[in-house]
Image (spheres, rainbow, N blue to C red):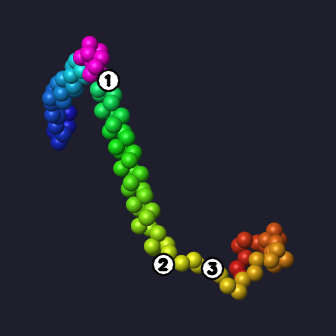
Protein backbone atom coordinates (compact mmCIF):
# COMPACT_ATOMS: atom_id res chain seq x y z
CA UNK A 1 0.00 0.00 0.00
CA UNK A 2 1.19 3.53 -0.77
CA UNK A 3 2.42 5.49 2.27
CA UNK A 4 0.10 8.41 1.32
CA UNK A 5 -3.03 6.28 1.58
CA UNK A 6 -4.72 4.74 4.56
CA UNK A 7 -7.38 2.21 5.34
CA UNK A 8 -10.24 2.41 7.81
CA UNK A 9 -12.11 -0.55 9.21
CA UNK A 10 -15.58 -1.22 7.83
CA UNK A 11 -16.49 -3.58 10.66
CA UNK A 12 -19.01 -1.10 12.06
CA UNK A 13 -20.83 -0.79 8.75
CA UNK A 14 -20.84 -4.56 8.25
CA UNK A 15 -22.31 -5.11 11.73
CA UNK A 16 -24.95 -2.44 11.09
CA UNK A 17 -25.99 -4.13 7.83
CA UNK A 18 -26.14 -7.50 9.59
CA UNK A 19 -28.24 -6.03 12.40
CA UNK A 20 -30.59 -4.45 9.86
CA UNK A 21 -30.99 -7.79 8.06
CA UNK A 22 -31.80 -9.55 11.36
CA UNK A 23 -34.38 -6.87 12.22
CA UNK A 24 -36.03 -7.19 8.80
CA UNK A 25 -36.23 -10.98 9.09
CA UNK A 26 -37.66 -10.69 12.62
CA UNK A 27 -40.25 -8.15 11.45
CA UNK A 28 -41.30 -10.40 8.55
CA UNK A 29 -41.63 -13.38 10.91
CA UNK A 30 -43.71 -11.29 13.36
CA UNK A 31 -46.03 -10.11 10.59
CA UNK A 32 -46.49 -13.66 9.29
CA UNK A 33 -47.38 -14.92 12.78
CA UNK A 34 -49.83 -12.06 13.43
CA UNK A 35 -51.99 -11.38 10.33
CA UNK A 36 -53.82 -8.54 12.08
CA UNK A 37 -50.58 -6.56 12.12
CA UNK A 38 -50.30 -6.93 8.35
CA UNK A 39 -53.89 -5.75 7.91
CA UNK A 40 -53.28 -2.71 10.11
CA UNK A 41 -50.04 -1.96 8.29
CA UNK A 42 -51.82 -2.18 4.93
CA UNK A 43 -54.47 0.30 6.11
CA UNK A 44 -51.75 2.63 7.36
CA UNK A 45 -49.86 2.51 4.06
CA UNK A 46 -53.10 3.09 2.14
CA UNK A 47 -53.96 6.08 4.32
CA UNK A 48 -50.50 7.60 3.81
CA UNK A 49 -50.75 7.16 0.02
CA UNK A 50 -54.20 8.78 -0.06
CA UNK A 51 -52.97 11.71 2.07
CA UNK A 52 -49.97 12.24 -0.22
CA UNK A 53 -52.22 12.23 -3.31
CA UNK A 54 -54.62 14.71 -1.71
CA UNK A 55 -51.72 17.04 -0.80
CA UNK A 56 -50.36 16.87 -4.37
CA UNK A 57 -53.79 17.71 -5.82
CA UNK A 58 -54.24 20.63 -3.39
CA UNK A 59 -50.80 22.05 -4.24
CA UNK A 60 -51.46 21.68 -7.97
CA UNK A 61 -54.85 23.41 -7.73
CA UNK A 62 -53.39 26.22 -5.61
CA UNK A 63 -50.61 26.78 -8.16
CA UNK A 64 -53.11 26.80 -11.02
CA UNK A 65 -55.40 29.21 -9.16
CA UNK A 66 -52.52 31.56 -8.32
CA UNK A 67 -51.31 31.52 -11.94
CA UNK A 68 -54.64 32.76 -13.32
CA UNK A 69 -54.14 36.47 -12.46
CA UNK A 70 -50.63 36.39 -13.95
CA UNK A 71 -51.81 35.04 -17.29
CA UNK A 72 -54.84 37.35 -17.29
CA UNK A 73 -52.63 40.44 -16.77
CA UNK A 74 -49.99 39.25 -19.22
CA UNK A 75 -52.38 39.22 -22.15
CA UNK A 76 -51.93 37.67 -25.55
CA UNK A 77 -49.11 38.53 -27.97
CA UNK A 78 -49.73 38.44 -31.70
CA UNK A 79 -48.25 39.88 -34.91
CA UNK A 80 -49.90 42.49 -37.04
CA UNK A 81 -49.27 43.39 -40.66
CA UNK A 82 -48.06 39.89 -41.60
CA UNK A 83 -49.57 37.57 -44.16
CA UNK A 84 -49.06 33.88 -44.29
CA UNK A 85 -50.07 33.36 -47.91
CA UNK A 86 -48.87 30.16 -49.58
CA UNK A 87 -47.85 32.11 -52.69
CA UNK A 88 -45.08 33.86 -50.68
CA UNK A 89 -43.20 30.60 -50.01
CA UNK A 90 -39.76 30.49 -51.67
CA UNK A 91 -37.99 27.22 -52.41
CA UNK A 92 -34.64 26.70 -50.66
CA UNK A 93 -33.74 23.64 -52.72
CA UNK A 94 -31.47 25.54 -55.15
CA UNK A 95 -29.70 27.71 -52.53
CA UNK A 96 -26.29 27.04 -51.02
CA UNK A 97 -26.33 27.00 -47.22
CA UNK A 98 -22.80 28.49 -47.08
CA UNK A 99 -23.79 31.46 -49.22
CA UNK A 100 -23.95 34.77 -47.31
CA UNK A 101 -26.71 37.23 -48.05
Alpha-carbon neighbours of circle 2 within 10 Å: few (<14), some, or many (≥20)? few
For the N terminus, which image quadrant? Answer: top left
Element type at marker 1? helix
Q: Residue at x 71, y 86 (%)?
A: 81
For the C terminus, which image quadrant? Answer: bottom right
Q: Where does label 1 land, which residue?
A: 39
Is residue 36 part of the magenta span, yes or no? yes
**Observer-nearest residue: 70 or 77?**
70
Q: Is residue 65 above or below residue 85?
A: above
**Observer-nearest residue: 51 or 14?**
51
Q: Is residue 76 visible?
A: yes
Q: Where does label 3 land, which residue?
A: 78
Element type at marker 3? loop
Q: Give residue 73's mark.
A: 2
Q: CA distance from mark 3 to mark 2?
A: 15 Å
Q: Residue at x 81, y 68 (%)?
A: 93
Labels 3 and 2: the sequence-earlier one: 2
Amino acid sequence: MDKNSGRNSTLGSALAILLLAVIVVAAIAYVLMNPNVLKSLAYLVLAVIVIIIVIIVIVYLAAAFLALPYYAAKGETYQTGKTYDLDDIVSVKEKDSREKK
